[in-house]
Image (tube, helix red, strand yellow):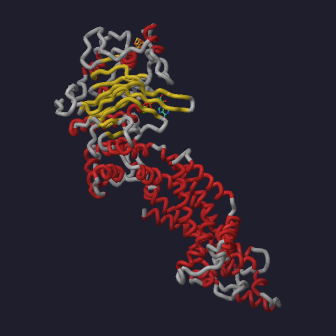
């Protein structure tokens, strides 16, 4: 197990280094002179030269990369051109919002998706299955932004049940925070819930007809133990894979959802930065996204090895 | 055999399991399929009864119907009493108490029959927790003892391994440990050795015999391997197309098969011995028919050399048959023109397992 962990962590680290290089080179390869955007009003040759010097753009690429990496490792991701604030403190404000939104969406989607999937498999061919299938179809085919707009229209504007936009910090006002973030989280989680439900249903149908489920029944276990401990646990291996693959989509979904609900998160920060060609921010944002992907994949792999002993042991061998 | 003090004085030996008129039909897309037809079967305490027959003759369906393990499309009628408890039509809560505690199963494929994501110790402990109310820790300690009982070396470390880390024979031993954990009266072993090497088979049969001797467990062993029957069974039930066609003590069956089907089986595998792992009962030309209804005829008639109009016109009753040599007590066959052959082969020289 420890060996497996170390190997996987090493792979993740290597991926992260590669991602950093790609992000760095990618930013440099963008059309247009970053100095022009960075300079703002003052576009005199002398002014541009000063800007280039200030941002290290007059140095060689390897030197620039080294500079970027050493500063990034010290938590210094540069200064936003638009706001003049350090990028790291902007991230410090925006990231928690997005992390909270995503985690809540994942938790809700997993609970609803796994629950409905199990129900649909166990009650095969009965109304509960049709209902769950119908919901999944809606969840999959209706885009986020449309669901979000409908939710704002009916649940916020018409009835005032939820705030239509804005955010309060979890630490200042936990209840108010939940009130603001629950609706966006539900909207963000619908697609994921639908995918999880379908996957759970089909892999549950497989495991329910497996020999070991017959063994579990033959032991005199209660249906709850047969379904939960024996069938579901095996089904989760497949479900975790699918969830892992879907999480990338969740990050982009979060960008859209934050925009609709006016949440001051990472998505909003990204969109603002792109529109304003705020290079230091874009660079940081892309790097953070890449890191998030890598970390998530690592966590998914960890989860696998917790669920499936065959992986755990294979890693040791 | 001990004389029972229990209820039924008309029964000579203590019958642990008493199956009468058991029939099973399945609803399928192409209509009804009759899988088991009026099967009678009994199992005395400490007895090992073998059920033989070709693939598809209803052995597994008979076995599964006892514990109510058939899918919802099955309709089971008749009676199966386990120590007086009626199992046919019993409610789920009643069956749940019986399964794993009084009636336990071992299946053919030990790999797929064990849960790949739970340790073997956990899978054994589970049955003790649910039926004997042991704590997880107590159950685990018992699991180690049970692993030792079925001959698994270093049980204290094996208890934490997962099925994929064990060999086929070891997995089957785990299945057996799980099955006997609560000391069931009846153990149903559905082809417990079919998926295993011949040498491993012998070890598994040894474990089963040993359990019978030590714990007095009655065992219903299903197989299409006559070698297994000769090795371990006290009595044999021969099934064909859902019906019991012959029933006899093991040495009696091998010496004086009465039903033409049984005679054909034995003729096709002349040396049913310890290592006859390849006798698959497939040497008689033709196939077991799949029936939608049970006809009033001998269902073996299409493949039988002795068949005549009587055979095709009415079903022979299962009763003692005369013929060459006297039939021993408890030897019945359903045949209008029973074989008169008396065999003097290796199988009869073997001590019947006991
Ligand atoms: N779920 C089911 N639905 C319909 N028919 C079934 C079902 N299960 C079994 N059968 C039918 O019942 C008959 C008996 O099957 P069974 O599994 O008992 O045979 P078997 O004697 O155990 O054979 P094998 O040696 O191959 O295990 C077969 O004809 C089979 O097609
Ligand atoms: S009853 Fe007739 S057909 Fe059937 S086995 Fe006997 S002789 Fe053959
Ligand atoms: Mg079978």
Q: Position of residue A259 (x, y in %)?
A: 69, 74
| Front residue of B7 and A67 | B7
Quarter of the picture holding the N terminus of chain B: top left
Instruction: Please tell me whether residue B201 is drawn above or below residue B335 in the rendered image.
Output: below
Instruction: Please tell me whether residue A37 is drawn above or below residue A231 in the rendered image.
Output: below
Quarter of the picture holding the C terminus of chain B: top left
| Front residue of A278 and A57 | A278
Q: Position of residue A70 (x, y in %)?
A: 59, 82
Q: How many marks?
A: 0
Instruction: Please tell me whether residue B269 is drawn above or below residue A281 in the rendered image.
Output: above
| Front residue of A62 and B294 | B294
Q: Position of residue B116 (x, y in %)?
A: 43, 50
Residue at (37% x, 39% y) in the render: B90
Compared across the picture, whether B101 is left or right of B306 comes to left
Compared across the picture, whether B337 is left or right of A190 comes to left
Residue at (79% x, 77% y) in the render: A32
Q: Is residue B55 visible?
A: no
Q: Position of residue B89 (x, y in %)?
A: 39, 36
Residue at (80% x, 91% y) in the render: A42
Compared across the picture, whether B346 is left or right of A133 comes to left
Q: Residue furthest right?
A: A44
């Amino acid at each position: 197990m420890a060996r497996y962990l170390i190997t996987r962590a090493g792979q993740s680290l290597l991926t992260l280094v590669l991602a950093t290089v790609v992000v760095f080179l990618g930013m440099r390869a963008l059309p247009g002179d970053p100095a022009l955007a960075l300079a703002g009003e003052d576009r005199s040759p002398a002014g541009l030269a000063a800007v280039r010097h200030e941002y290290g753009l007059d140095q060689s690429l390897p030197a620039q990369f080294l500079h970027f990496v050493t500063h990034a490792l010290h938590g210094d991701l540069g200064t936003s051109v638009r706001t003049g604030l350090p990028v790291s403190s902007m991230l410090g404000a925006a990231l928690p919002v997005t992390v909270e939104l995503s985690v809540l969406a994942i938790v809700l989607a997993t609970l609803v998706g796994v629950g409905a999937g199990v129900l649909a498999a166990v009650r095969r061919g009965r109304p509960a299955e049709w209902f769950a299938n119908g919901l999944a179809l809606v969840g999959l085919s209706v885009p986020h932004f449309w669901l979000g707009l409908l939710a704002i229209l009916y649940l916020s504007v018409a009835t005032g049940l939820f705030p239509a936009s804005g955010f309060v910090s979890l630490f200042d006002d936990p209840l108010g925070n939940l009130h603001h973030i629950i609706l966006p989280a539900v909207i963000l989680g619908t697609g994921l819930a639908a995918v999880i439900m379908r996957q759970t249903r089909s892999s549950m149908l497989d495991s329910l007809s497996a020999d070991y489920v017959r063994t579990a029944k033959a032991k005199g276990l209660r249906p709850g133990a047969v379904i939960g401990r024996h069938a579901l646990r095996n089904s989760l291996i497949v479900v975790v894979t699918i969830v892992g693959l879907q999480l990338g989509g969740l990050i982009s979904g979060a960008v859209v959802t934050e925009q609709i609900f006016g949440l001051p998160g990472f998505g909003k920060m990204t969109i603002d930065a792109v529109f304003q060609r705020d290079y230091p921010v874009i660079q940081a944002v892309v790097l953070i996204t890449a890191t998030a992907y890598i970390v998530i994949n690592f966590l998914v792999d960890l989860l696998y090895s917790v669920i499936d002993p065959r992986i755990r042991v294979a890693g040791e061998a | 055999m001990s004389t029972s003090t229990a209820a039924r004085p008309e029964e000579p030996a203590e019958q642990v399991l008493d199956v009468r008129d058991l029939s099973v039909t399945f609803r399928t897309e192409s209509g009804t399929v009759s899988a088991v037809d009026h099967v009678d079967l009994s199992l005395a305490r400490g007895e090992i009864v073998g059920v033989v027959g070709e693939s598809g003759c209803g052995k597994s369906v008979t076995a599964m119907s006892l514990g109510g393990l058939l899918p919802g499309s099955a309709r089971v009628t008749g009676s199966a009493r386990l120590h007086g408890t009626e199992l046919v039509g019993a409610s789920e809560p009643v069956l749940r108490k019986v399964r794993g505690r009084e009636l336990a199963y071992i299946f053919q494929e030990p790999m797929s029959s064990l849960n790949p994501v739970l340790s073997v110790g956990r899978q054994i402990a589970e049955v003790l927790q649910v039926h004997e109310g042991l704590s997880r820790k107590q159950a685990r300690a018992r699991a180690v003892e049970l692993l030792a009982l079925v001959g698994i070396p270093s049980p204290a470390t094996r208890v934490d391994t997962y099925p994929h880390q064990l060999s086929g024979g070891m997995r089957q031993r785990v299945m057996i440990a799980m099955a006997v954990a609560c000391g069931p009266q009846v153990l149903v072993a559905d082809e417990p050795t079919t998926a295993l090497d011949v040498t491993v088979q012998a070890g598994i049969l040894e474990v089963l015999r040993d359990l019978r001797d030590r714990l007095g467990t009655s065992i219903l062993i299903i197989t299409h391997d006559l070698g297994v029957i000769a090795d371990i069974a006290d009595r044999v039930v021969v099934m064909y197309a859902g019906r019991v066609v012959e029933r006899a003590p093991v040495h009696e069956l091998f010496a004086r098969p009465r039903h033409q089907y049984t005679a054909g089986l034995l003729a096709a595998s002349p040396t049913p011995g310890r290592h006859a792992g390849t006798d698959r009962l497939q040497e008689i030309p033709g196939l077991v028919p799949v029936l939608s209804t049970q006809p009033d005829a001998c269902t073996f008639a299409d493949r039988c050399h002795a068949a005549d109009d009587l055979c095709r016109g009415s079903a022979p009753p299962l009763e003692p048959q005369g013929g060459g040599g006297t039939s021993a007590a408890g030897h019945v066959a359903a045949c209008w023109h029973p074989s008169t052959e008396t065999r003097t082969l290796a199988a009869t020289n073997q001590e019947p397992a006991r």
